[in-house]
Image: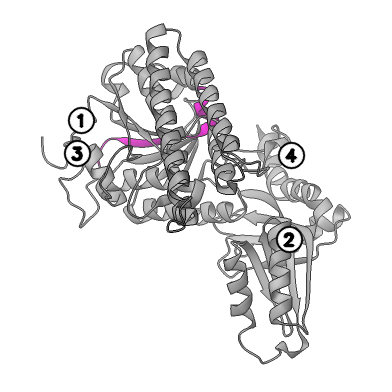
Amino acid sequence: MTKQENTKGVAETGPAAPPARRKHTVEKIGGSSMSRARELIETILIGARRGNDLYSRVFVVSAFGGITDKLLEHKKSGEAGVYALFAQADNEHGWMEALSGVSRAMHAINTSMFDDAGDRHAADDFVRERIEGARGCLIDLQRLCSYGHFQLGEHMQTIRELLSALGEAHSASNLALLLRRHGVNARFIDLTGWRDETQPTLDERIERAFGEIDLSRELPIVTGYAQCREGLMREFDRGYSEVTFATIAALTGAREAIIHKEFHLSSADPRLVGPENVRKIGRTNYDVADQLSNMGMEAIHPKAAKKLRQAGVPLRVANAFEPEDPGTLIDAEQAAHPGVEMITGLPVTTLELFEQDMVGAKGYDAAILDVLTRHRVRIVSKSSNANSIVHHVEATLKSVRRVERDLAERYPSARVTARRAGMVSVIGRDLKGLGVMLKGLTALDGEGIAPISAQETGRGVDVQFLVRSAELEEAVKALHRTFIEAAAQPIKQAA
């Protein structure tokens, strides 16, 4: 077997150049799907596979649904988890009880996941070791920081990573154990750095972990969190698992990277426009994936997509519970036939700074960006004219108020206003020459919706319509009917 064909190890080709493309895939399972792990055994994990077909795959897993919310904070509601309670430090009982709650939730998952008592006890012992180890670490840190020479704030990012790692370690360990019970030679790959005193880079940690794995005979189950010198959460926060997944695919020269979700990547949210009206995208490119991410519908984190694109690894988004369906392929190819592929909407806050003296003056834009960056406010889109700059942002009301206050102090004669709105985006690989702006405005007018604004860039990837907050859902439906459902009618009638 030549070096190019060999599936053992990852260090043979060296870090200087992307490794030769191999036969294996790197696949990611999200938290919601992981919560249905026993069903996954019958679909993507084993299903009809036998013998060698079970291998030449790598699975990167997220924590079970809801666990990371309990460990950090609820992603949508912001309800405090262990991390947030520890950061508040009002009293130690709050975070300690929350950590005990995480332990109980993990034990409940073990009970539902394992029929065999031995497997269940092994899973419970794993949870006990990790939870109590983390508890002891936090108690020691809290005691240390009671002295004036040590500041808790300096360690909060490390604590966030430590806590988050507990969820991925639990899910990966459990899944490997469950697969072994079903006769698969699964191997738990722990990238969380538990009790590891070294500080490798992300690439070094992955290469070290995969250096002795024979992908033709073993099925690696890998933690979505990887402890490394760069600090994944510092840059990506809770998007770290996709970065780990993409880095593994790039470093190992995977044939394909696959993300398994509970649904197909479709032309719109089926809960909004109706499952009978959506259509699976089937194939698109990384430009579209980036636009989806910008609109809060991440097929994959943009930084993870960049890693895959640069390494020449195509990405597939598939439904974990429909293994016979190939899903949607995302690669670098342009569309053979121009057309709209997706309609999506996002609630935003429109932040406008109006200043009469802005005409011909410099520095306003940079100052606004500085304030938005300082308060960690994500910009979805922006526009400007002679005396006003408008940013459409995704942020909490508290963050927006802070931004307004800072801008008012910096520009006392300016008028700063903020209002809720809805951003609807029409997205496709190639929209040039299709009259999307005009058709979109006509469709919205037909439903009695008067857009606040509309804009498109010269790249022909998306057209954005800003509408009143209350009209967001109706705008998505109207545009979907025009660009997706109406376009499919001739095909349906011919069939």
The amino acid type found where label 4 is placed reads Leu
The mark that comes first in sequence, 4 or 1, is 1
Residue 350 versus residue 28 in the image, above or below: below
Task: Please say if the residues under marks 1 and 3 sit with CB atoms less than 8 Å apart.
Answer: no
Q: Secondary structure at mark 1?
A: loop
Gap between marks 4 and 1 measured at Cα: 45 Å
Kindly identify which residue carries mark 4: 272
Kindly identify which residue carries mark 2: 349
Q: Number of numbered discs present?
A: 4
Gap between marks 3 and 2 measured at Cα: 48 Å
Q: Position of residue 337 (x, y in %)?
A: 54, 53
The amino acid type found where label 1 is placed reads Asp
Kindly identify which residue carries mark 3: 211
Which segment did they paint magenta? Answer: 22-36
The mark that comes first in sequence, 2 or 1, is 1
Q: Which of the two marks, 3 or 4, is nearer to us in this view?
A: 3
Residue 23 is one of the magenta-drawn residues: yes
Q: Position of residue 208 (x, y in %)?
A: 22, 42
The amino acid type found where label 2 is placed reads Thr
Task: Please say if the residues under marks 2 and 1 sit with CB atoms less than 8 Å apart.
Answer: no
Q: Secondary structure at mark 4?
A: helix
* Circle 2 residues within 10 Å: few <14, some 14–19, many ≥20: many
Kindly identify which residue carries mark 1: 214
Q: Position of residue 194 (x, y in %)?
A: 33, 37
The mark that comes first in sequence, 3 or 4, is 3
